[in-house]
Amino acid sequence: MKKNRLAAGALALAVSITACGCGDQIYEMTDEEETAIVQYSAHVVSKFNRKQSEGIENVAVLKALMKIREEEAKKRRQQEEEKRQQEEEKPEQKPDASGSQQQGTPSAGQQQKAYVSLTKALQLDGVSASYRKYELVSAYQASQSYMVRANSGNELLVLHVNLKNSGNKTAECDILSKMPSFRLTMNGETSVSADTTILLNDLGTYQGKIRAGKTKKAVLIFQVKKGAVKSVDSMELEVTSGGTSALVQLEG
């Protein structure tokens, strides 16, 4: 009886050992795949780490703010459309006998535009914002693990902006709390609103500390119809924050 028990135990052990060798082999990642996963994990931890000063403290808060921004942008677009329709319905001024226009309030096209700096439009303190360049791409590679792609039939117009701390001490840059919205007008005719993204370097949701003398790079992403913008002669960026709008002329 004892021998039978020993034999049964030995058989069970042999079966278990054999079964352990029959499973799937462990997938071995390449150096490139391992690097991509590590960097993606670092981005996620950096953005949502409560104890990190550069991180966003609450994901729910971020989603709520982004929703508010989208609703404000939609409401503002409706108001702009109504304003344009009212201006189109206004009768044109006819010249008098001398050939000059009758006196009255100048039309919207005749009014001189007042531009401000991007720093003032964003209401920044201790940090300056400056436009660097734009690019038209089908996709924006934010990192090795995250990419923003244009919708079908569109392409991305990406504005690159520098956030610079010219002071002698670390400055806090919190643009997210201001909940700004952006509308870009190109060549005086094509006008589009900025996309709301979860990019760490999205200008509209940027939060972080910038050390003295250092510069952080940020972007704004716009969706435009493919081929609609072949060249850009002029660009105006309308920044709306707290119910106040400011117009920035982008050059360079």
Image (tube, grey):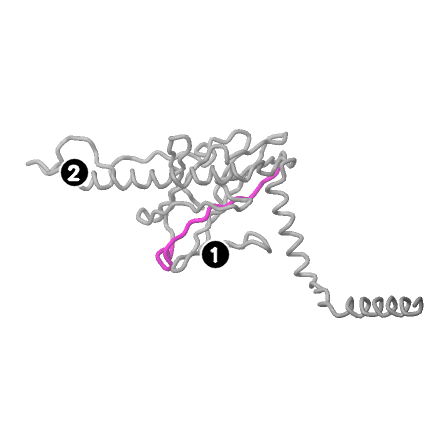
Q: How many marks?
A: 2
Q: Where's the N terminus, which quadrant?
A: bottom right
Dot 2 amino acid type: Lys
Q: Earlier in the sequence, mark 2 or mark 1?
A: 2
For the residue labelled by badge 1, is the local secondary structure a helix, a strand or a loop? strand
Taking the image as shown, residue 210 lies to the left or right of residue 155, namely right
Taking the image as shown, residue 26 lies to the left or right of residue 2, namely left
Taking the image as shown, residue 157 lies to the left or right of residue 98, namely right
Q: Is residue 245 above or below residue 138?
A: above
Residue 149 numbered tag: 1
Q: Nearer the viewer, mark 2 or mark 1?
A: 1
Q: Is residue 212 above or below residue 44?
A: above
For the residue labelled by badge 2, is the local secondary structure a helix, a strand or a loop? loop
Q: Residue furthest front?
A: 1
Taking the image as shown, residue 5 lies to the left or right of residue 213, namely right
Q: Is residue 123 above or below residue 150?
A: above
Q: CA distance from mark 2 to mark 1?
A: 41 Å
Q: Position of residue 85 (x, y in %)?
A: 22, 41
Residue at 85 percent across and 66 percent down: it is: 13
Q: Which residues are magenta?
A: 214-231
Q: Main secondary structure of the magenta part?
A: strand
Residue at 50 percent across and 37 percent down: it is: 129
Q: Position of residue 9 (x, y in %)?
A: 87, 66
Residue 90 numbered tag: 2
Q: Is residue 169 magenta?
A: no
- Foreground of the two, 144 or 198: 198
Q: Is residue 93 above or below residue 151?
A: above
Dot 1 amino acid type: Arg
- Foreground of the two, 136 or 3: 3
10 Å crowding of disc 1: few (<14), some (14-19), many (20+): some
Q: Position of residue 217 (x, y in %)?
A: 55, 44
